[in-house]
Amino acid sequence: MLEVTDLHIEIEDSLIPETVVHDFDITVSPGEIVGIVGESGSGKSMSAHAIAGLLSRKDMKKKGSIMFEGEELLSMPRSRLRDIQGDDIAVVFQEPMTSLNPVKTIGWQVEEAQRIHGNMSDEELRDAAIRMLRDVEIDEPERVYYKYPHELSGGMRQRVMIAAALICNPKLLIADEPTTALDVTIQAQIIELLKRINKEKGTAILFISHDLGLVRTLCSRVVVMNKGRITESGTVEEVFNHPREEYTKQLISAIPKFRKIAEASPVPDRKPILEVQNVSARYKKITGYFNPGAKQRLVVKNASFTMYEGEIIGLVGESGCGKTTLGKTILGMLDDTDGKIVHYSEMPQMIFQDPYGSLNPTKTVGWILEEPLRIKGGYSEKERSGKAREMLSLVGLDETYMKRKPDALSGGQRQRVCIALALMLGPKLIIADEPVSALDVTVQEQVINLLIKVNRELGVAILFISHDLKVVYELCSRIIVMKSGEIVEQGTDEEIYNNPQHPYTKQLLLSAGYTEVTQPDGI
Amino acid sequence: MKTVFKKLFTFVITVLLVTLFVFIAFELIPGDAATARLGINATPEALSVLREELGLTRPFFVRYFSWLFSFFFGDMGTSYSYGVSVRSMLASKLPITLTLTLMSFVMVVVLSIPIGVITSKYEDRPASKIIDVIGQLTMSIPPFFLGIIVTYVFGMILHLFVPGGFVSYNVNFGKFLGYLVFPSFAIALPKAAMSTKLLKTSILSERKLDYVRTAYSRGNSTTDVMYKHVLKNAIIPVITFLGMTLADIVAGSLVIEQVFSIPGYGRLLITSISNRDYAVVQAIIAIIAMLVIIINLIVDILYQVLDPRLRGN
């Protein structure tokens, strides 16, 4: 059905033309699910967008051939391509919030492709859209039809995207990281939905993802990409069990797979470093300038736990469960809180999720690192830069990075700088808020190893906030599970993973694919 | 209902403050209605008699609140200099200023929206760049100077209108409109250039967003993507600007009325200030303040119509 051969994509910038995809080949047969995996910047999305006819920028040169149902997509006129887009080939994108038009109703957007390609009356369109919404398991589709994207949850939005893509019953569905922006339990539901659609409607799916675990469960064949080239392709069986290329092996071994990177460090005397007692936090919900009677929303409810010196605790839960708010409350970054927080150490520090937004782009790494010392005062220039160099080398970056600006660093390097920055004042407690979520798997592994090193060598306790149970398993010795602002369960890793008490913990583990049996050899 | 009440509250407070400031300003500047009417050579006795007659000897707050009370019931008082009812003076001039303002505003919208859409579509063509430069130039010309240029080009060279030959609406409505086209154009041009630029930038940044890619993936043509998806999103910031512009046009028309000798609120306001004619000045300022607030209210409502994210549940 789809046969891509020798696809080259070149970006003709004003400076040097850069080929971003080389010799890309892929075939998809009717009813098949094929995966493309690779890290960010590997060219996987670019290739998929080329197939969907979405690389129309004048400065992008495409060579090779994309045959779809016996027609050459690359050379056909735009008008013919538009007939195929949305009708025979449909796309689901990564970020369902931004990929939907914010000022159009859900119904309008689900109907759109049918309005363009079919000739249905308004009532028929509406009926078809509501049927489709029901088909992707949206409750009360008649009501949702009149809603706007911002009124729906992330998972609902992605279902709407899928409904809108499937409305014309396309032969090929291109799913570009469709679950990356979603919580783990929602992720599992969307994957189930895609499987069901494939089975019931026979829609072929081209599934693009950085998540090898997902590709393995969903796809029959897989293409591995790195730096714009295909490194390996074959059946899922072949590629995952008998990888031939070094890069593929490395990628597979970097998949978080419920495996301990390090055993819990021995704690000789359990001296507390932090006590959280009945802490609640609320946000004022601002309902508008003319509504000063703002409603309050309780984000953290009555949380209590104790943290000991030198330990790594995992704080897990889905987005919106209040885990970040609890982290901020502990550091005193919020005003409206109740309860008692006792710190037994000075200057606890925080590391944030997004290493791109956390560093001032106009300053050098050296300047950024020295800032806490400058603010604290009492250090000479030499002492400051000496300390900055020391921390840089600890996180594995050499002195030349002192003069660079954040823009010149990769995501992983930036997160290393953020860790070095958190260590500048010699804290005994670090709160790391999703520090690896924005990073590729191979880089993720390196940053986790670095955090373990910091913990071991400097004895820094880490409160590791994450939605990813696999990552948490790798380095945490105790786990706290949060749901809707409440701590529903806490215990040692052994207790939480192998003997979960709360139904929510069980559900999380199930969605993450954890069973005690799979524990030894992974995924 | 609550929102309506709050808006009404803001409305009243703003009118109160603006008129109070005008009253205070008149207290501070030298001279009053009596000296303005009798001239500098008037005897102190004559002045005090007239002051008594006009009610100027009463304390400041008594004068202010008595004015406010009458105004609230539609009585704007009597002009000190002309001795006629302010209400009838303003009523006869209202159609002139209102027509000038609305005509300018329509020109801003009619010029800027199509030009903004077209220049964003052909963003990298030379013609689009030339329009940008012209726009930049237009923005930097002060309105009164633009008024002089318009008078010179359209009046003296092209003879499309007779400068100074204003015809009132009750004499010949067609000629009245024909004359106002040119001052409106002088007011509208810089605003239209700004609005064009804003719309163009807004469209260009909207076009980079993810939902545009989704729209293409469903088989929309470039034209459909623009009119069915991008424009409604891109127009939102422009609406705010147009709201502010409308308020600004009211102020701008006061100046342009001088340049084109149009007997509207602008000229009346300026003569009334030099005559220390409180009653007229107060009424005009209060009316303009109310107009501006009403315009803002309309913008707020439009905003909620256009952007569902701003609607309350």
Image (cartoon, helix red, strand yellow):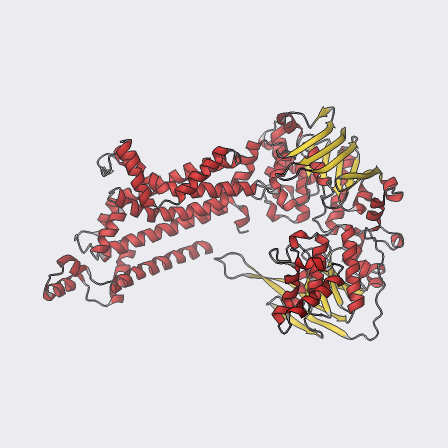
Residue at 37% x, 58% y is B14
Q: Is residue A6 left or right of residue B220?
A: right
Mark yes or no: residue A227 visible: yes
Mark yes or no: residue B76 visible: no
**Residue in front for this viewpoint, A448 or A375:** A375
**Residue in front for this viewpoint, B143 or B53:** B143
Image coordinates for residue A224, horizontal then vertical, percent: 80, 41
Q: Is residue B230 left or right of residue A433?
A: left
Image coordinates for residue B164, horizontal then vertical, percent: 23, 39
Residue at 35% x, 52% y is B290
Q: Is residue A414 left or right of residue B263?
A: right
Image coordinates for residue A360, horizontal then vertical, percent: 61, 58
Tell me: residue A303, above or below residue B75. Answer: below
Q: Quadrant of residue A262?
A: bottom right
State which quarter of the image contains the N terminus of chain A: top right
**Residue in front for this viewpoint, A451 or A397:** A397
Q: Quadrant of residue A328?
A: bottom right
Q: Is residue B97 left or right of residue B311?
A: left
Furthest toward the top, the residue is: A70
Residue at 83% x, 39% y is A232
**Residue in front for this viewpoint, B13 or A392:** A392
Image coordinates for residue A444, horizontal then vertical, percent: 76, 54
Residue at 80% x, 63% y is A453
Label tally: 0
